[in-house]
Image (cartoon, helix red, strand yellow):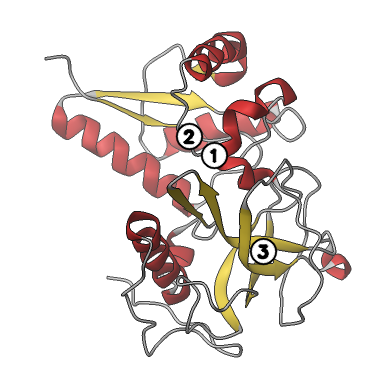
Amino acid sequence: MPPPVFRFAPSPNGYLHLGHAYSALLNFDLARRAGGRFLLRIEDIDATRCRPEFEAAIHEDLAWLGISWETPVRRQSQHFARYREAVERLAGLGLIYLAVAVNLTTSLLGAFTLLSYLFVYTPLKRVTWLNTAIGAVPGALANAIYNACGVRIREHPITRGMPREWLHVNDELYDKLRGPGQNMHVLATTFSDPAKGGTGRHEPMILTIDYGKGRVFHTPMGHDLEAMRCVGFITTLQRGTEWAATGEVTIPIPANFPTAGQTSSIPMK
């Protein structure tokens, strides 16, 4: 049996943070314990934001952490033609099942109807609530910080019983998502404040989509350890997963669910 392979795949569109360090150290340690391989893969697919100095800083920071990796390092931008060929072949066979959060070429959109909700730009305006969006960066995926969540469809099994407004802990704000968004239901959004560099739009935070007899649930919340400790995120993920699997939700809204004026997180262990 070949040795197990572990990898760390950062995007060189900024400097590494503690979540990156944790992921890299965890996989490097697992590779050593299992007698496996550790690979570094550079996700340089966003040509508008990826920069050579960030890639150089990734190498420097990982080396400072005591992490070593196999060479040559794989750079995703060097393999677009190969990936496109593979996707089109699988699409022709009806075998596409993906989770992505980046823009696709127009020629491939038909193959990704299942997850088209990830690319919709939602011009919704009929809600007002707290927000802390700051410093949104133009592009498909922005690095603004937000922590307010407004529930738009309260009768859906996932959001039923949630407060109309509740505070998520600070998390990355995805904005300017675009695409067909067919059969999509936006259950909750957050406002990207233009006064703080945001888009001035309500960005989708909890989404579902109907696909034949199937059900798809998606949330872009939960990008680092702090965000994943939020009771609102945990509850949303649990209830959304149960709904996608069964069409029903039996997991209750916990008593310590966040409110419009107070966040709530489980303690760090």
Q: Is residue 139 left or right of residue 96?
A: right
From the viewer's perspective, is 149 left or right of 136? left
Residue kind at label 2, given as amino acid type = Leu
Residue 144 locus on image (x, y percent): 71, 59
Residue type, numbered disc 3 = Ile
| Residue designated by label 1 | 114
- Tell me the residue at 39%/40% (across/down): 65
Callout 1 crowding tier (Cα within 10 Å): few <14, some 14–19, many ≥20: many
Mark sitting on residue 98: 2
The disc, 1 or 2, on the residue closer to the chain's N-terminal end is 2
Q: Most extreme residue toward the front, as rendered?
A: 213
Name the mark on residue 145. 3
Whether residue 187 can be seen here: yes
In this rendering, which labeled residue sits more in front, label 1 or label 2?
A: 1
Does any portion of residue 44 appear in the rendered image? no
Say if mark 1 contacts mark 2, CB within 8 Å.
Answer: yes
Viewer-side residue, 149 vs 97: 97
- Residue 260 locus on image (x, y percent): 60, 88
What residue is at 76 percent from the left and 78 percent from the top? 127
Tell me the quadrant of the picture where the C terminus can be found.
bottom left
Q: Position of residue 63 (x, y in %)?
A: 43, 32
